[in-house]
Image (spheres, rainbow, N blue to C red):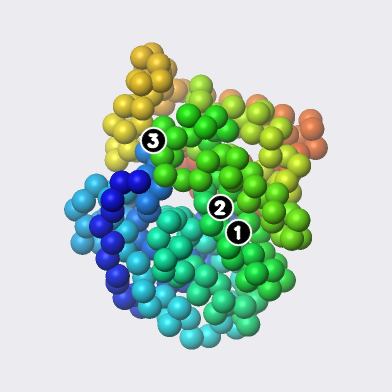
Amino acid sequence: MVKVKVREIYVKKVIQKSNLPATNYVVNPYVGCQHGCIYCYSEFMKRFTNHHEPWGSFVDVKINAVQTITNPSYYRGKRLLFSSVTDPYQPLEKKYKITRSILKALISGQPKIEILTKSSLVLRDLDILKQFEDVTVGVSISSINYKLSRQFEPYSSPPQKRLEVLRKCKEEGIRTYTFISPIIPFITDIPSIIEGFLHYSDFFMFENLNIRPTNITKIFTVLEKISFDLPLKFKKIYANNSTYWLDEEEKWRRFCEDRGIKAYFFFHHGRRWDKNDRVDR
């Protein structure tokens, strides 16, 4: 794993109001992430920090996060997502246990907890998660092919480990989902992911690859290594007049409807979130 610069910081609050669909609040125990996903679009967070290092080379640990939660009952019945711009179970969590301490502090308030991660470390906290009346654990995945996964998500848990997360959570009576994200054209084998994860998923979520100026060079570098013609194909997909993602969204909606698969879609390339994206689970 690439060595990252770790800094312990103090924050005023760790639970923030959210504009994401079906989520009242987001909880980001860290700034930055060790997983090093080359497609990550969270680099915009750098402008809110004093970091000038490349995204993925630093992590700020919100060392006083749990002390900022003074009234857990305030969040009763509200949905809290761990996390929106970091992974709550990246490797540093094994040492610092910030996510674990926050969850423990919230038990008495009984908010609706949603975990989204690429890490099998979440299984460490099953003892705490089972103490919430409403809890959901999801894993995001873009490929079940180990070699491809390593190229795009070099330091996250392998695909089979993520499948194991859902299996064990289901055994413990925890609601689960698979977030097929990002969908990388010509790379993400959606039918194979659905087939492999269906038995352990209460529902699926879909999100397209979001290419931004901050990640395009890294993405294209990896694509060229896989096949020299992929960058050109991607340029056509992301052209202003392209209907690729609209067509893909409709195709996978029909696919899931025909098979009775509960699914939610967040295809937002080139447009803002709107009320039709909202999912009240």
- Name the disc covering residue 267, or none: none
Vertical relation: 181 (above or below) 227: below
Residue corresponding to mark 1: 123
Q: Are marks 2 and 1 in contact (CB under 8 Å)?
A: yes
**How far is the residue under mark 1 from the one under mark 3?**
31 Å
Q: Amino acid at mark 2?
A: Ser
Residue corresponding to mark 2: 120
Quadrant of the drawing holding the C terminus:
bottom right
In the depicted view, which residue is nearer to us: 199 or 268? Answer: 199
Q: Between tags 1 and 3, which lies in front?
A: 1
Q: Is residue 50 visible?
A: yes
The residue lying at 30 percent from left, 70 percent from top is 8
Q: Is residue 69 left or right of residue 112?
A: left
| Mark 3 residue element | loop
Q: Residues within 10 Å of mark 1 (few under 14, many from 20)?
A: some
Q: Residue 50 in the image: state x and y as whole percent.
A: 21, 61
In the depicted view, which residue is nearer to us: 206 or 89? Answer: 89
Q: Residues within 10 Å of mark 3 (few under 14, many from 20)?
A: some
Vertical relation: 256 (above or below) 52: above
Q: Residue 74 in the image: state x and y as whole percent.
A: 57, 81
Q: Earlier in the sequence, mark 1 or mark 3?
A: 1
| Mark 1 residue element | helix
Q: Amino acid at mark 1?
A: Leu
Vertical relation: 271 (above or below) 126: above
Q: Amino acid at mark 3?
A: Ile
> Most extreme residue toward the bottom, as rendered?
70
**How far is the residue under mark 3 from the one under mark 2?**
27 Å
Dividing the picture into quarters, in which one does residue 31 lie? bottom left
**How far is the residue under mark 2 from the one under mark 1?**
6 Å
Residue corresponding to mark 3: 211
Q: Earlier in the sequence, mark 3 or mark 2?
A: 2
